[in-house]
């Protein structure tokens, strides 16, 4: 069952406050929305009648009436989201608050091209929904993250360096042929940033670095994802200083990606006679104190940190959260910190926190859920 969210703007604002955990009662809604208690009550009744909210837990407490607790109705709907990597896809069904109900990972070679990949994703959605979601709970939105730049105006993938056959492919239109629902297509680092932002409620300006096979960065400004024209945060092809010269897959010499991405580190390790299959394997080598792996990861962290110094001085974020499969390597974050604290303006780093991402492996899926809820509420 597929259905658009039947809400108007004011109802949507209240639903959003409950879904994102800001409000748990009618009194919370009145306080946070600025609406009169009577008009909050009217809209809450409408949302309950529409099957989107439920109210429970009435009773007395400390002599007074305890406010009844508002929550999303279990039948309000679900979102189906995916995060495509080079060789696998992580898939989830979330409730409207973005909480994962079920998550699974499947092998999926993105190099097989957009049609085969997206058909695999939609077939996986269908089987997850059939197995885990009751028939009376509608699907409200579908989204996918991709490891390449996305034009936010057309939702097409634009000149990706690691996705052969995807350039200019109409990903959203392809999904819309299958689902008559809000569709989200977003760069994977942007999704990670949108998910991570939920874990830093006191921070309005964040940079979320994804250090995996490639290098990506998502930017949250004043609490919202900053896309620019689609390329915002794409630091992978910034030129770095180097004694040697390495040609990047993009055709230019000495991009950050050519030195500090998981793919670059795997090639460098292979030249040293150590063959690994995934960036996560490099973390294992670092944990086992293999000197060449540790020194490569430290060098990658230093180069990433040098690029970040410019961005920290320019953007002055509260937080740099480092995620992706390489982020579990301690020397990576240590080297990033050292470079940033050494070179940035003291004012820029005075209250800056550089830390491993908190959202965990489902960060991008949760981010997709948060962005999809916004498009579903925007109608
Ligand atoms: Zn490049």
Image (tube, rainbow, N blue to C red):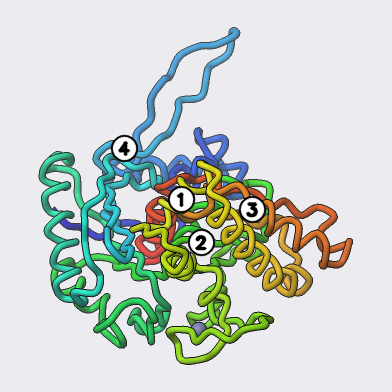
Q: Residue at x 51, y 24 (%)?
A: 67
Residue 50 seen from this side? no
**Above or below: residue 24 compared with residue 297:** above
Residue that label 2 marks: 210
Residue that label 1 marks: 16
Q: Residue at x 42, y 57 (%)?
A: 279
| Residue 223 percent coordinates (x, y) | 61, 59
| Mark 3 or mark 4: whose residue is earlier in sequence | 4
Marks 3 and 4, how far apart at CA: 41 Å
Image quadrant where residue 159 sits: bottom left
Element at badge 4?
Answer: loop
Instruction: Assess disc 2: are there few (<14), some (14-19) or many (≥20) residues with their C-alpha within 10 Å of its C-alpha.
Output: many
Give the side of residue 50 with respect to residue 336, left or right: left
Instruction: Assess disc 3: are there few (<14), some (14-19) or many (≥20) residues with their C-alpha within 10 Å of its C-alpha.
Output: many
Marks 4 and 1, how far apart at CA: 13 Å
Residue extending furthest toward the top? 63
| Mark 1 or mark 2: whose residue is earlier in sequence | 1
| Residue 298 percent coordinates (x, y) | 63, 58
| Mark 4 or mark 2: whose residue is earlier in sequence | 4
Element at badge 2?
Answer: strand
Marks 2 and 3, how far apart at CA: 12 Å
Q: Residue at x 50, y 34 (%)?
A: 24
**Above or below: residue 177 compared with residue 376:** below
Q: Which of the two marks, 1 or 3, is nearer to us in this view?
A: 3
**Above or below: residue 232 compared with residue 11:** below
Q: Residue at x 41, y 58 (%)?
A: 274
| Residue 121 percent coordinates (x, y) | 19, 61
Given residues 170 and 256, the one toward you in this image is 256
Given residues 95 and 209, the one toward you in this image is 209
Image quadrant where residue 320 sits: bottom right
């Amino acid at each position: 069952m597929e259905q658009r969210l039947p809400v108007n703007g004011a109802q949507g604002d209240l639903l959003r406050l409950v879904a994102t955990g800001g409000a748990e009662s009618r009194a919370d809604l009145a306080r946070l929305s600025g609406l009169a208690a009577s008009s909050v009550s009217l809209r809450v009744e409408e949302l309950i009648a529409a099957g989107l909210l439920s109210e429970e837990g009435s009773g007395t407490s400390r002599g007074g009436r305890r406010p009844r607790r508002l929550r999303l109705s279990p039948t309000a709907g679900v979102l189906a989201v995916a995060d495509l990597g080079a060789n696998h896809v992580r898939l989830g069904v979330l409730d409207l608050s973005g909480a994962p109900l079920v998550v699974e990972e499947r092998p999926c070679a993105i190099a097989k091209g957009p049609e085969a990949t997206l058909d695999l994703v939609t077939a996986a959605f269908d089987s997850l929904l059939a197995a885990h979601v009751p028939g009376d709970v509608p699907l409200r939105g579908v989204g996918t993250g991709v490891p390449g730049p996305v034009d936010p105006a057309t939702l097409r993938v634009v000149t990706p360096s690691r996705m052969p056959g995807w350039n200019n492919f109409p990903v959203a239109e392809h999904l819309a042929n299958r689902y008559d629902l809000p569709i989200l297509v977003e760069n994977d680092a942007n999704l990670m940033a949108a998910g991570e932002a939920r874990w830093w409620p006191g921070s309005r300006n964040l940079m979320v670095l994804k250090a995996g096979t490639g290098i990506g960065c998502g930017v949250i400004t004043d609490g919202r994802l900053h896309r620019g024209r689609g390329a915002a945060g794409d630091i992978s092809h910034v030129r770095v200083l180097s004694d040697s010269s390495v040609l990047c897959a993009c055709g230019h010499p000495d991009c950050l990606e050519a030195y500090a991405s998981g793919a670059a580190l795997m090639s460098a390790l292979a030249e040293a006679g150590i063959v690994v299959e995934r960036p996560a394997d490099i973390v294992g080598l670092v944990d086992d104190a293999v000197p060449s792996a540790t020194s490569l990861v430290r060098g990658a962290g230093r180069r990433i940190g040098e690029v970040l110094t410019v961005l920290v001085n320019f953007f002055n974020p509260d937080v740099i959260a480092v995620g992706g499969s390489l982020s579990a390597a301690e020397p990576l974050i240590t080297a990033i910190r050292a470079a940033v604290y050494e070179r940035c303006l003291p004012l820029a780093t005075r209250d800056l926190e550089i830390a491993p991402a908190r959202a965990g492996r489902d960060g991008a899926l949760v981010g997709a859920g948060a962005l999809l809820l916004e498009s579903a509420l925007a109608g």
